Amino acid sequence: MTTITKDNTRTPIGVVVAIIAISVVASLFLCWLVYYHPPADVAGTHLLFLPALNALLNALSAIALVIGFCFIRARQISRHRMAMFIAFIFSALFLVTYITNHALHGDMHFQGQGFVRVLYFPLLISHIGLSVVALPIILITFFLSLTGRFPAHRRLARFTFPIWLYVSVTGVVVYLMLAACR
C-alpha cells in the first residue's frame, strides 16, 4: 500500500509503519532497561566513562546537525548530506553506549536540591518525551532522503531538525546537571 503525496511521489505506508513499530519496540526496551532491569555492574566499576561518552556523542551530533543545517541553507546538498550522516552515526553510537551504560549501571538518580531540581525534571521529561518522538521521525526523514522523496523530506525535516537538535543538546545538559550534583 502506498500514498501519493502533493509532489506525486509514492511513500510506502508499510515502511513508515515498520519504522514506527521498530521505534515503539526500541522505546519499550529502553524503558524496561532503564526502569526495570537490574544493573549488571552493581559495584559500578566497569566502563565508568560511558556517561561522559554519551554526552560527547550527543554534543558531536548537535554540532553535525547545525553544520548540516548551515550547508542546506547554503544549498550545498552533498555537504549537507554528509553532515547529516555524521549526525546520524554519532546518534547511533550514542544509542549503543546509552544501552550499554544502562545495562551495566542502571538509572542514575538526580541528587540536586532546591531550584536546580525544579529545572532538572521538566528538562528531563521533555528530553525523554522528545527522544521517543525523534527516533521514528529521524528514520522516516532519512528514508525519504535516501529514496529521493525530497519534497516530503524537506517538509518533515522542518520538524525533525529542531526536535533532534533539542534532544541532543538537552542530553548534554542533563549529563552536566547529573555530574554537577553528585
Image (cartoon, rainbow, N blue to C red):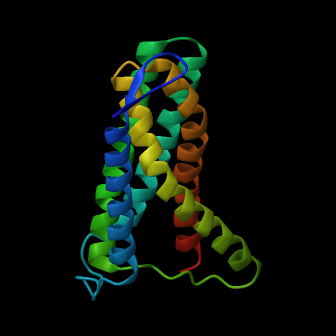
**Left or right: 94, with 133 as reference point:** left
| Residue lying at 59% horizontally and 68% vertically, measured from the top left | 124
**Left or right: 138, with 93 as reference point:** right
Task: Give residue 90's quadrant in the image.
Answer: top left
* Extreme residue in the right direction: 115
- Counting from the top left corner in percent of width and height, residue 141 is at 44, 34
Give above or below for 102 relative to 24.
Answer: below
Give above or below for 94 relative to 118.
Answer: above
- Counting from the top left corner in percent of width and height, residue 54 is at 40, 58
* Extreme residue in the top direction: 75
| Residue lying at 48% horizontally and 58% vertically, measured from the top left | 132
| Residue lying at 33% horizontally and 61% vertically, measured from the top left | 26
- Counting from the top left corner in percent of width and height, residue 164 is at 53, 45
In the image, 27 versus 10, the foreground residue is 10
- Counting from the top left corner in percent of width and height, residue 29 is at 32, 69
In the image, 137 versus 174, the foreground residue is 137
Give above or below for 139 relative to 47.
Answer: above
